[in-house]
Amino acid sequence: MTDIARVLVVDDSAYVRKVIRQMLARSPFLEVVGTARDGREALDRVEELKPDVITCDLIMPVLDGVGFIRAQMTRRPIPIVVVSVASESGELVLAALDAGAVDFVQKPTALATDRVLEIADELIEKVKAAATSRPPITRDVPPRAAVHQAAARRVDIVVIGISTGGPQALKRLIPRLPAGLAVPIAIVLHMPVGYTELYARKLNEQSALTVLEAQGGEVVTAGHVYLAPAGRHLTLRRDADGRVLTYLDVRPLDTPYRPSVDTLFQSAADIYGARVLGIVMTGMGSDGREGAAWIKAKGGMVLTESEASCVVYGMPRSIVEAGLSDGEVLLDAMADALLERV
């Protein structure tokens, strides 16, 4: 990023507005140009200040965060990073993402204390990424796909890595896959602790496949989607009877993210060899690059989401630039690309 991104901070707490302004001021690439106390005031401030990106609380008087995001997206789509408390607003966070928010940062507490400063590095990183992101995906999820009968299965499992923009993108992809899908899917989605179970449940309601947050010990079964729980790595292991099971662990401890896309991809390649399809989708950073290299080394395939449909073209870019992508695919074509290979 070379230009300075103009940021509007929206929060009903004067203390939080002050602290977020101070945190973002640490980056030479960010400038807080204004603040707002609620969603209604924020709509006026957006018109006045023309910010490049917004940070937004969810629980506010007059017009709450979700209402503001919906209203703003109808006026002019703009990258919005939600900054909220998981324990109080889990449902609201998912509603905000559905409404068009790009990403979110979990406040460590709802209280006006210095603990808010704990999120400084994450907040700066996500606001910078949001400032360079594309307009978020806000279209309706399509109807469930018809049952697909593949002539010959080329892979035995699909593994997906995804981050910023991921909750919206997966709602475009997974409901398009048929109940008769002949392979299982395992997913690492970067989310804070406290959201993945709720997100998996909501995605399951919209999908013909069975979507669940992995608990560890499940027999990996075709037609099922296993979402890694936030805070633990999801890997695959084969038991004494030859069955492939999910396995959860906090180790390795040295990965930038937990769960890690690299960790899932490597374990899938170790178990399934060449019969793995890895898919790396929208997200910042390079998680998945080492795992993609592992899949390719075992003879498997790797697809990446096209830059044109990514909210943030970071993770897929790292795969493409490393020469590891077998094809770049637009989000709305990803279901068909997956089905062609299974």
Image (tube, grey):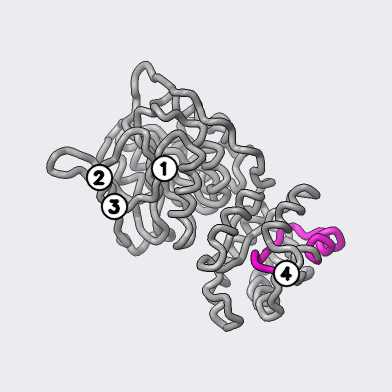
In contact (CB < 8 Å): disc 3 and disc 2: no
Q: Find the distance from the CA under tag 3 to the CA under tag 2.
A: 8 Å
Amino acid type, residue under disc 1 in the picture:
Val
State the residue position of label 2: 245
Badge 1 marks a residue whose secondary structure is: strand
Q: Position of residue 68 (x, y in %)?
A: 73, 58
Q: Find the distance from the CA under tag 4 to the CA under tag 2.
A: 47 Å
Amino acid type, residue under disc 3 in the picture:
Gly
Q: Position of residue 315 (x, y in %)?
A: 51, 47
Instruction: Tell which tag, 2 or 1, sits nearer the viewer.
Output: 1
**In this view, 11 is above or below 252:** below
In contact (CB < 8 Å): disc 4 and disc 2: no
Q: In this view of the protein, which residue sits in the foreground, 200 or 185?
A: 200
Q: Position of residue 309 (x, y in %)?
A: 62, 39
State the residue position of label 4: 61
In primary-sequence order, the first of circles 4 and 1 is 4
In primary-sequence order, the first of circles 2 and 1 is 1
State the residue position of label 3: 216
Badge 4 marks a residue whose secondary structure is: loop
State the residue position of label 1: 211
Residue 186 in the magenta stretch? The answer is no
